[in-house]
Amino acid sequence: MGRKLKEYIVALQKLLESGEDIENIGELKKELLTEIGFWQHERLIHLLVTILFALMTMAVFMVLLFYPQISMLILLIALLSLMIPYIRHYYILENGVQTLYVFYEELTKRQGNIPVECVPKLKGVVIKELKK
């Protein structure tokens, strides 16, 4: 999912940085709003899963404090090792959605619907190149 989001962001960034006039800016904004909705849903689901894993990790840690057993220690290590990828993935989703917001505001600015000073500059958006 992170790769798909990154590819979409890179494509939008190239389009916006090209400086060319966008013919169907209204259609592009509608598509972008739809994509933002999908990614917000994905972000919410991953937030809930991350919170669930954090609560389970804390519960296992509490049990381990009162009933020290090797099986609980192994379970705690397994849960902690899963928390790292979950947090990383949620971080990618959060930053990606925030970047899509900036792109939407840039499109709105180009359409002339909001004042220019209300829109953050695209220079603040830095996307690393995709690994092949």
Image (spheres, rainbow, N blue to C red):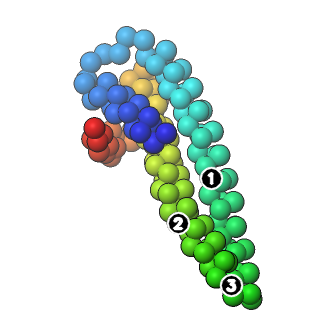
Q: CA distance from mark 3 to mark 1?
A: 30 Å
- In the rendered image, the residue lying farthest to the top is 23
Mark sitting earlier along the chain (3/2) = 3
Name the mark on residue 69: 3
Q: CA distance from mark 3 to mark 2?
A: 19 Å
Residue type beneath disc 1 = Leu
Instruction: Label 2, secondary structure: give it.
Output: helix
Mark sitting earlier along the chain (3/1) = 1
Can you give x and y, in whole percent of width and height, for residue 22 in the image? 35, 16
Residue at x 53%, y 29% (from the top left corner): 35
Instruction: Classify 113 as above or below 44.
Output: above
Front in this rendered view, residue 100 or 56:
56
Residue type beneath disc 3 = Gln
**Viewed as shown, does residue 122 lie left or right of 59?**
left
Instruction: Label 1, secondary structure: give it.
Output: helix
Residue at x 53%, y 52% (from the top left corner): 90
Front in this rendered view, residue 71 or 41:
71
Can you give x and y, in whole percent of width and height, for residue 103 in the image? 42, 33
Mark sitting earlier along the chain (1/2) = 1
Q: Which residue is mark 2?
A: 81
Mark 1 Cα-neighbour bin, 10 Å: few <14, some 14–19, many ≥20: some
**Viewed as shown, does residue 62 lie left or right of 114?**
right
**Can residue 118 be seen?**
no
Q: CA distance from mark 1 to mark 2?
A: 17 Å
Q: Which residue is mark 1?
A: 47
Can you give x and y, in whole percent of width and height, for residue 73 in the image? 62, 79
Mark 2 Cα-neighbour bin, 10 Å: few <14, some 14–19, many ≥20: few
Residue at x 50%, y 26% (from the top left corner): 32
Can you give x and y, in whole percent of width and height, for residue 97 in the image? 50, 41
- In the rendered image, the residue lying farthest to the front is 70
Comparing marks 3 and 1, which lies closer to the viewer?
Answer: 3
